[in-house]
Structure formats: C-alpha cells, structure tokens
Image (spheres, rainbow, N blue to C red):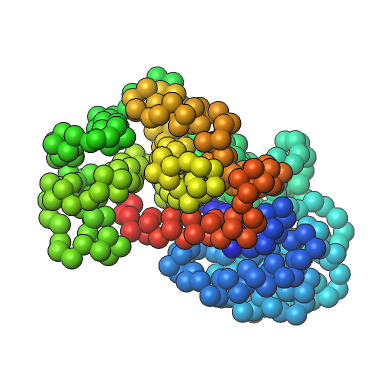
C-alpha cells in the first residue's frame, strides 16, 4: 500500500491518499474492487495511528465498495471516500453516498470534470479534487466557479512546484497534493547559515573515509542541537546498545563508520529544515528515497551505503534552497554519485530514478527501470512499503518546532 501526502495552506500535513498498487501501472486497472479491498485491509492491519498520524485518510472507492458499504470498515471520523471520475454515477451510487455521509463519512469527487451524472453528488460532497495540470487557468477558474457550494473545500492535485503552490494558494484552494514542497524556488546566491554550514562540514568528513574522528568530535561539539539529535538516535531501542551513551565521544567510538555516517546525515537534514514550512514532509520524502535506494542497490549492482546517501542528498537542495551543483562543491561524493544528483541517467541512477518515477506516477518509466534491474512487481511494491513505513517511523522519533 502506498500513500501520498495532502497538505493544508500552511504546508502542515492534513492527511494521505491511500493507494494499494497491486500493479505499478494502474492500481485500479480492471481490478478496482480488489484494489479497494486491499486498501481497506491494509489500513486495518497496519497501525494507522503509528504509521500515518491522526490525519485524514483519502480512499479511492469503486462501485462495489460504495454500494456494498465495504468502506464502513474504515474509521468514520478520519476517512474521506473518493468517488472516482471513471465511476458511472447512478441512483445506486447517489443513495450509497448519501447513506455513508449520514453515517459520518466525508465525500470527495476525484479528478472532477463537469457532467450531469457526477454533478448529482456536488450537493453532498465535502471536497472536490481538481487536476492542477489538466487544463489552463481559464478552464480551472470555470471549474472552481461551477463546483463551489457551501461546505465544499477545493483540493489541488499534481501541484509539483513552489510557484504552482503559490498560484493555487491565491486561487482559494484549501488543500494541496503533489511534491511541490520538494521543489522550492532556488536562490543561486544563497549563503548557507553558519549552523547549517557546520552540518555540511560534518557530511564532508563522514563521506570521505577513513573518518577523522577527533575532527568529527570537535565539529559536533560546536553545535549542541546536533549533539542532542545524535545522542537521541544512538540511544534509541533499534541500536541495541545496552548502556546509555552520554557523550559524543562514546557515540563516535561505539558506532560503526557507516551507521555513524547515516546518523549524522539524518541529524543534519533534521537541522536543515528546522522551522521551514513542510519540514516534516520533506524529511519523510528524503528518508523514503534514501531507504528505497539502499534496498534497491543490489538490483542495480551498487553500494547500499552510497545509494542511501544519493537518496537523501536528492532532497538536500530543497532543504537548503540552494542548487545541488553548489552543494556538491562542498561534498566529496564519488564522481558517479555526484553525476546522479546532477541528472545523469547511468546505471547508478536507476534506484533514485525508479523512486522518483513512482512518486510522479510515471508508470512507463517504472516499467522500464524494473525491467532493466529485473525487479518483479511484487518486489517493488514490497520495497516501497518497507521504505514508506521505515521513513515514517524515523520521522515519528524527531521533534519539530
């Protein structure tokens, strides 16, 4: 089961759209009812409160799931039922939606385009989702005017850049779905603040083995916030260290170099986005890419450690609002790894390319890359699920202000 974040006007997490992708090409191609049942089953069996917080859960619904009330297994207060644009809305669908609405569920019209059948649901809908890239400004304005009713909130889908987010914000949308938070406006002459510059120095040190641990300790000790983050991670249950680690020196001595590099990387990115809008979502994205690239590395005949680093670094430009080319000048990445981040499509780029194609629902590229790396569909879905859950678990341990 996959999920896509939905943010509010302040870029706080409002909820997720849940998608079970039994086939990366199209979760609902010919097997919509089975896919919806899988979403419901997955939502019930996984710990939603732990994995996805307490936000809204947007679930794609098919005819069967609505008319047979399968969706009533989902929690009433949190669930938003998405009526797909491909659905033939008749009396049975309208009656089912009215019944579910009376039970407390919210209704969303997905990828809305005007037609007499779908318009029958406008008076009971709570959300209307408009594809921000499907038509021009004039057509979007006409659609917004057409759907507005008391109680309806507009959700802009496929908002992929900060400029698009700002435009949608000005047009009155309430919620936003897309990866715009990972593509901010870049500032060519941006000066990296001193505290964040220390993070880059640390990354440079751990990326260039063997690591000078004395220098590492000195740098860490100049930033109490980083020290706190590192010690918090070292002492987490997952590390399996029996005695509490109380000093940075102890931590440096007791942790293997590769794990230490990962921890400093995570502590640094947490610091990079501190106080930024959409910080939590940006870190989740970076961690998911890092873990996915690490798990997929063997299929691409690459180093897991380096692929983890590539995945994490792929969001670093967004965190610091600085072009990746400028950041790479400060970091001693291997030439092939740096080339991936600069857009090279060689073999080392396959794991990151695959993750990003999946994020963008570019199923043709997903198929091509899976074929090249000999990754079967079930393995891809399993790996994505692992990366999703791991990244959410890591973020849940962090403290955001």
Residue 178 location (% of width, % of height): 59, 46
Closer to the camera, 104 or 217? 217
From this viewpoint, is residue 69 visible? yes
Residue 214 location (% of width, % of height): 13, 36
Q: In the image, is residue 260 above or below residue 392?
A: above
**Number of marks:** 0
Quarter the N terminus occupies: bottom right
Q: Quadrant of residue 218?
A: top left
Q: What residue is shown at x 34% (from left), y 39% (from top)? A: 272
Q: In the image, is residue 28 above or below residue 364?
A: below
Q: What residue is shown at x 12% (from left), y 55% (from top)? A: 246
Closer to the camera, 101 or 263? 263
- Residue reaching furthest to the front: 301
Q: Quadrant of residue 353?
A: top right
Residue 179 location (% of width, % of height): 55, 43
Q: What residue is shown at x 31% (from left), y 45% (from top)? A: 258
Residue 27 location (% of width, % of height): 70, 59
**Left or right position of 160 against 286:** right
From this viewpoint, is residue 98 visible? no
Q: In the image, is residue 41 above or below residue 295?
A: below
Q: What residue is shown at x 60% (from left), y 74% (from top)? A: 41
């Amino acid at each position: 089961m996959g999920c896509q974040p939905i943010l509010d006007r302040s870029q706080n997490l409002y909820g997720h759209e849940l998608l079970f992708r039994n086939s990366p090409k199209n979760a609902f191609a010919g097997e919509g009812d089975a896919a919806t049942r899988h979403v419901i089953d997955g939502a019930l069996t996984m710990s939603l409160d732990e994995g996805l917080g307490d936000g809204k859960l947007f679930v794609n619904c098919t005819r069967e799931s609505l008319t047979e009330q399968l969706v009533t297994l989902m929690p009433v207060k949190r669930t938003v039922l998405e009526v797909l644009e491909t659905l033939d809305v008749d009396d049975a669908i309208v009656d089912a939606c009215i019944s579910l609405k009376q039970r407390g569920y919210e209704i969303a019209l997905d990828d809305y385009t005007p037609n007499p059948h779908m318009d029958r649901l406008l008076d009971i809908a709570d959300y209307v989702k408009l594809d921000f890239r499907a038509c021009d400004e004039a057509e979007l304005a006409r659609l917004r005017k057409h759907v507005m009713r008391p109680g309806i909130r507009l959700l802009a889908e496929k908002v992929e850049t900060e400029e698009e987010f700002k435009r949608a914000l000005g047009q009155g949308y309430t919620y936003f779905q897309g990866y715009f938070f990972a593509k901010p406006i870049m500032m060519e002459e941006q000066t990296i603040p001193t505290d964040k510059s220390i993070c880059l120095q640390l990354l440079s040190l751990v990326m260039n083995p063997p690591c000078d641990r004395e220098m590492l300790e000195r740098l860490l000790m100049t930033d109490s916030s980083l020290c706190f983050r590192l010690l918090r991670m070292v002492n987490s249950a997952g590390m399996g260290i029996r005695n509490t680690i109380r000093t940075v020196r102890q931590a440096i001595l007791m942790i293997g170099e590769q794990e230490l590099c990962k921890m400093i990387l995570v502590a640094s990115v947490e610091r990079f986005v501190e106080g930024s809008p959409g910080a939590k979502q940006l870190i989740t994205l970076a961690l998911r890419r890092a873990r996915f690239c690490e798990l997929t590395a063997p299929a691409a005949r690459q180093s897991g450690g380096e692929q983890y680093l590539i995945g994490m670094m792929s969001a670093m430009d967004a965190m610091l609002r600085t072009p990746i080319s400028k950041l790479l000048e400060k970091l001693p990445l291997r030439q092939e790894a740096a080339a991936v981040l600069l857009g090279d499509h060689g073999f080392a780029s396959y794991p990151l390319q695959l993750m990003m194609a999946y994020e963008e629902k570019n199923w043709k590229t997903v198929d091509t890359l899976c074929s090249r790396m000999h990754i079967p569909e079930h393995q891809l879905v399993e790996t994505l699920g692992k990366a999703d859950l791991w990244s959410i678990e890591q973020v849940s341990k962090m403290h955001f202000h």
